[in-house]
Amino acid sequence: MPDDDETPEESFDGAASEALSEETPDRSPLPEKIPRRKIDYKEKPSRPPGDTPADIGEPDEPIEPDEPNGKPKKPRPKPGPDADDVKAKPLIPIRFRTYAQDSATGVYSVTVLPEKSTDVDGMLVVSTVGDDQKALAEIKSAQFVNGGDISVPKTGVLGPIKFKDGEALKLEIVLSEPLRVAMEVSAYET
């Protein structure tokens, strides 16, 4: 059997490339160094030539802010307690359970039980929970299972609700959009 060094090798493309595979001491010259340039982060990004606002669908004039301080106007909140306002109050420790009664219509059953003996008025804050974030639940309506509507003053806020000592509250919540989600419930004093 011949040695591997003695066996002629064929190239993959079928052409004889012995001249190309020879090693030589000559090297090709290295490219010139590219000059450094510091980046000024305060500069506005420039557009390529011919890239005008009309070409990319932007308005020709800059949009003026609504407020004199340069900030856009904030939308007016609905009257009533905001979830942040409610969360500023003392927390009522509770145990809760939520499950979908009818996920096609967005109806959920919620059971809330105060952990400590308490006889206080409070608000419930209901959030939808995902893998990496949570958001206030968009609730269309809420009612007690045994009858009686519950006020929904803001997104994710229910109440005021009377918490009675050792009594579980059973609620039915209808979401604005029929979603199948996990929920978190917290209670705050009013």
Image (spheres, helix red, strand yellow):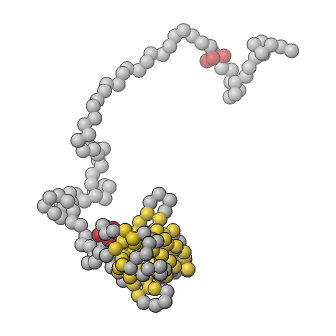
Looking at the image, the residue that sits furthest to the right is 1
- Residue in the image at 21% along x and 66% along y: 73
- Residue in the image at 63% along x and 17% along y: 21
Looking at the image, the residue that sits furthest to the bottom is 147
In the rendered structure, the answer to whether residue 34 lies left or right of residue 183 reads left
Q: Residue 129 in the image: x percent, y percent?
A: 47, 65
Question: Could one spot residue 13 in this view of the protein?
Answer: yes
Question: Could one spot residue 137 in this view of the protein?
Answer: no
Circle count:
0
Q: Residue 151 in the image: x percent, y percent?
A: 36, 83
Q: 162 and 170: which one is in front?
A: 162
Q: Residue 156 in the image: x percent, y percent?
A: 39, 73
In the rendered structure, the answer to whether residue 50 lies left or right of residue 112 reads left
**5 to 105, vertically: above or below:** above
Looking at the image, the residue that sits furthest to the front is 117
Looking at the image, the residue that sits furthest to the left is 68
Q: If the image is split into quadrants, where does the N terminus sit?
A: top right
Q: Quadrant of residue 163?
A: bottom left
In the rendered structure, the answer to whether residue 23 lies left or right of residue 3 reads left
Q: Quadrant of residue 89?
A: bottom left
Q: If the image is split into quadrants, where does the C terminus sit?
A: bottom left
- Residue in the image at 31% along x and 25% along y: 35
- Residue in the image at 24% along x and 72% along y: 76
**19 to 136, vertically: above or below:** above
Q: 97 and 4: which one is in front?
A: 97
